[in-house]
Image (cartoon, rainbow, N blue to C red):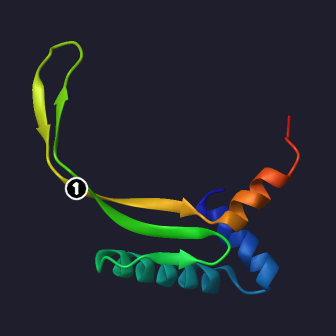
Amino acid sequence: MNNKELISSLALKMNLPKTEINNMLQIFTQTCIEQLKEDNTVAFQGFGSLEVRKKDERLSVHPVTKIRTLIPPKLVVCFKQSNVLKEKLNSQPDHE
C-alpha cells in the first residue's frame, strides 16, 4: 500500500476529504520525526514502536576489489512489533 492508497482508504473509512487525511498524515509524520530526533521512542499501542539506534562505525571490504572502506557511525530507525500485532499476523490462515 502506498501513500495515495492509504489516504484513500482512510478517507473512505473516516468519511473525511482526502485533503484533510493527507494533512493529518503529514502532521503525524512530522511529529514522529521530531520525537525520533529528540531520541524518544514512538509507540503505537497494539502495533509496535519506533526507536533510534546508533550503528557503530565499521570496516567494509569490497568483495571483488578487496578495497577497505571505513563506514562512519550513523543513526537508524528500528521497528519492534507489538505482541498483539504478532499474534494477529500469525493467527490468520496462509494466503497461498
2 left or right of 27 in image: right
Residue appearing at x 11%, y 32% in the figure: 69
x and y percentages locating residue 18 in the rendered image: 67, 79
35 left or right of 83 in image: left
x and y percentages locating residue 24 in the rendered image: 56, 85
Helix, strand or loop status at disc 1: strand
For the N terminus, the image quarter is bottom right
54 left or right of 2 in image: left
Specify the farthest residue to the right. 93
Q: Is residue 3 above or below residue 32?
A: above
Quarter residue 44 falls in? bottom right
Q: Is residue 92 above or below residue 44?
A: above
Quarter residue 39 falls in? bottom left
- Residue matched to label 1: 74
| Mark count | 1
Residue appearing at x 68%, y 73% in the figure: 46
Q: Amino acid at mark 1?
A: Lys
Within-10-Å neighbours for mark 1: few <14, some 14–19, many 20+: few
Quarter residue 15 falls in? bottom right
Q: Is residue 47 above or below residue 90?
A: below
